[in-house]
Image: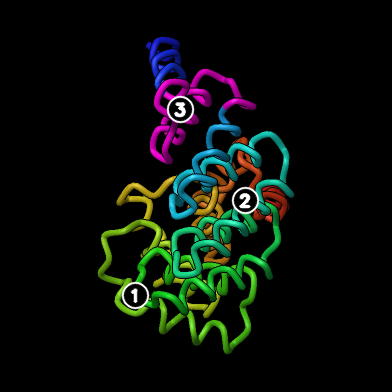
């Protein structure tokens, strides 16, 4: 009963005042009820009361992004980073935001900051390696990506296998690349990144039927993936 929960919390805030958790929960309820302006207002109150509440900042920024308000979303992430200078999570979320906008230099800067704060955070190391391989594939960066992905060959995490597989593709090691990229999908990795990477690897290895299958999935996806144009170009030749 979302309406009932909203009514209860609104009454509670009116009588008792709100705290960060109450406003955060109220923001979630408003969002689920498609009351976007009220949701944004509740999340704003949550971070004003409790600026250390990272989840409220992330939800607020994502809400702005979903409404096409990119500048407001970026401002929310940056405010969160400024008020929480030791937060790895917020810098990782900011990097994802920049990547979605195609702002890869800014994404790299955010991930480098996150990595400097915690070089053992697995998701940050993986995302940093992936970004270097995909968008900054200099020999120096590929060498660094090898260090960041050390041990991934025995990982059970699809995204890590995919990153290492794409690194092997960049290095020209096609059999190893295909084996790792197939393993990533076998362990549950699905989506535009996985289809693009394995499709391109199959194509480079002359396995055109398999390449067509992967790149067709990419082409039919509604996701706005950076590799769609290149995937479509290759698909048209098969």
Q: Residues within 10 Å of mark 1 (few under 14, many from 20)?
A: few
Report which quarter residue 140 is drawn in: bottom right
Q: Classify mark 1: helix, strand or loop.
A: loop
Where is mark 1, residue-wise? Answer: 120
Residue 26: numbered disc: 3
Residue at coordinates 57% horizontally, 74% vertically from top-left?
132
State whether residue 216 is above or below residue 115: above
Residue at 54 percent of width and 32 percent of height: 42
Q: For the magenta stretch, what is the residue range?
A: 13-38
Residue 179 at x, y = what percent? Answer: 37, 64
**Quick one: 7 or 119, which is closer to the camera?**
7
Give the answer, above or below, for where 193 lies relative to 103.
above
**Mark 1 touching mark 2, by CB under 8 A?**
no
Q: Is tag 1's residue or tag 2's residue first in the polypeptide sequence?
A: 2
Between the C-alphas of marks 1 and 2, the distance is: 26 Å
- Which quadrant of the view contains residue 94? bottom right
Residue 122 pos. (x, y %): 35, 67
Secondary structure, mark 2, is helix
Of circles 1 and 2, which is in front? Answer: 2
């Amino acid at each position: 009963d979302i309406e009932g929960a909203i009514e209860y919390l609104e009454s509670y805030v009116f009588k008792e005042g709100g705290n960060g958790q109450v406003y955060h929960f109220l923001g979630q309820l408003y969002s689920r009820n498609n009351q976007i302006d009220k949701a944004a207002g509740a999340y704003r109150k949550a971070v004003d009361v409790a600026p250390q509440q990272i989840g409220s900042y992330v939800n607020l920024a994502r809400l702005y992004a979903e409404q096409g308000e990119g500048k407001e979303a970026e401002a929310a992430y940056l405010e969160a980073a400024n008020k929480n200078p030791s937060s790895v999570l917020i810098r990782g979320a900011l990097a994802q935001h920049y990547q979605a906008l195609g702002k890869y230099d800014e994404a790299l800067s955010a991930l480098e900051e996150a990595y400097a704060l915690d070089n053992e955070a697995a998701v940050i190391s993986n995302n940093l390696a992936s970004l270097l391989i995909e968008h900054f594939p200099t020999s120096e960066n590929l060498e660094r990506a090898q260090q960041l992905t050390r041990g991934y060959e025995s990982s059970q995490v699809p995204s890590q296998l995919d990153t290492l597989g794409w690194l092997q593709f960049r290095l020209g090691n096609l059999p190893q690349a295909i084996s790792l990229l197939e393993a990533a999908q076998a362990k549950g990795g699905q989506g535009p990144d996985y289809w693009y990477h394995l499709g391109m690897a199959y194509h480079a290895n002359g396995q055109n039927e398999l390449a067509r299958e992967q790149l067709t999935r990419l082409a039919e996806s509604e996701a706005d993936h950076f590799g769609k144009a290149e995937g479509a170009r290759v698909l048209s030749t098969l």
